[in-house]
Image (spheres, helix red, strand yellow):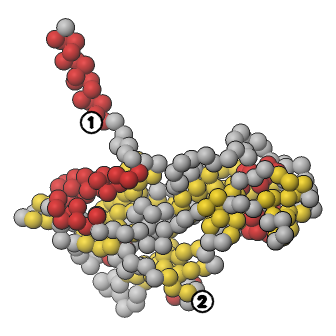
Amino acid sequence: MKKRLCAALLAAAMFAVYAPQTLAAESWREAFVTRLMRAMSSYPEYSEVVMTDIDHNGIPEVYLFRNSADGGISEGFTMSANTVTNITVPKDIIGGCLTDLTVYNDNGRYIFVGREIPRYANEIYLYKLELRSNQLIATKIKKEYVSNYSIIPYTDMYGNNFLTNGYPNRTKIVDFINRYDAVNSLTATKTLAKVLVNNNAVELSGYVIDNSNYFKIRDIAMILRSTGSRFNVMWNSSTNAISINVGEKYSVVGGELDEDTSTTQEIYTNNDPIYVNGREADIMAYTINGNNYFKIRDLGSIVGFSVDWSDSEQAIIIQTS
């Protein structure tokens, strides 16, 4: 009996050590403290930290880098679906690129731009920073790329005083994490608008984000499946891209037109590439509770259906070809 009890306790202990780190959404701060303590204990030279929110979902991404002019980024992490997840970081930019971000507003789309001053260069490098499928993408740009956009007030958090006698100081790390305050995080409310397709009412649930109506792209494909404005939607897992094929009948996958009944809301900007008939398109999209939502007017312009608003009926009027 004692042997069986010891074996059971040992198995339980091993599971506790190796089980995935899944936590409640509100506990991300405690989880991040633990992760930073472990990282700085292993590699104390990487003790500079930036907290920012590039996907703009209210939970920051955390990046560690070393204190030097060419200090590379050692690692990044965030919380996704209540689990602390790693972020793949680029090797061709220095961590200082993340310490002073400028955020531009492109018709509701936020463009995060970091500055880098290389050690042996006489110019400032600018990088557009995006988070795609837990990968930080840094694309070198020229100032003209964002010069016509307005700047949004934004401050990320940077700290470098976390070590005491060469070891991470938990009190300092806790204070740093607890002082983080989400800036310009996204919010979405359920839309109350009705939807009419060719004068026929359809049951369609969606969200209002920045005063625009967004709907699941697969829901729109479903309700237009038998019209002249049909289109198909596919996910390319090898390229992490959404593909829209205009004129092709939608292939049903299940779950279309189901209402989102989640009691919590996880929303972030979707920066995955979007291809329309094989060509990359610049379309605004958000991911809400695991589903991709598109602005209805954007879909109309690329697929080929008209979108109007009836103030008297408080309804979105869709007319297909």
Whether the residues at callouts 2 and 1 have beta carbons within 8 Å, the answer is no
Q: Residues within 10 Å of mark 1 (few under 14, many from 20)?
A: few
Where does the image place residue 230, in percent across and percent down from the top left? 85, 54
- First of labels 2, 1 by sequence position: 1
Residue 63 bears which disc, if any?
A: none
Identify the residue shown where x is 60% and y is 79%: 106
Is residue 39 in sight in this rendering?
no
Where does the image place residue 192, in percent across and percent down from the top left? 71, 60
State which quarter of the image contains the N terminus.
Answer: top left
Nearest to the observer: residue 179 or residue 113: 179
Q: Residues within 10 Å of mark 2 (few under 14, many from 20)?
A: few
Identify the residue shown where x is 72% and y is 51%: 218
State which quarter of the image contains the C terminus.
Answer: bottom right
Residue extending furthest toward the front: 312
* Residue position marked by numbered label 1 in the rendering: 17
Q: Is residue 293 left or right of residue 15?
A: right
Identify the residue shown where x is 22% and y is 12%: 4
Where does the image place residue 169, in percent across and percent down from the top left? 14, 61
What SS does tag 2 mark?
Answer: loop
4 up-or-down from 124: above or below: above
Identify the residue shown where x is 30% and y is 30%: 15
What separation in Å lies between label 2 and label 1 (alpha carbons)? Answer: 51 Å
Q: Mark 2 belongs to which amino acid?
A: Asn
Residue extending furthest toward the top: 1
* Residue position marked by numbered label 2 in the rendering: 148
Nearest to the observer: residue 91 or residue 37: 37
Is residue 170 in sight in this rendering?
yes
Q: In this view, does 216 lie to the left or right of 49?
A: right
Q: Is residue 205 left or right of residue 180?
A: right
Q: Mark 1 belongs to which amino acid?
A: Val
Where does the image place residue 68, in percent across and percent down from the top left? 23, 76
Q: Quadrant for residue 256, please give it.
A: top right
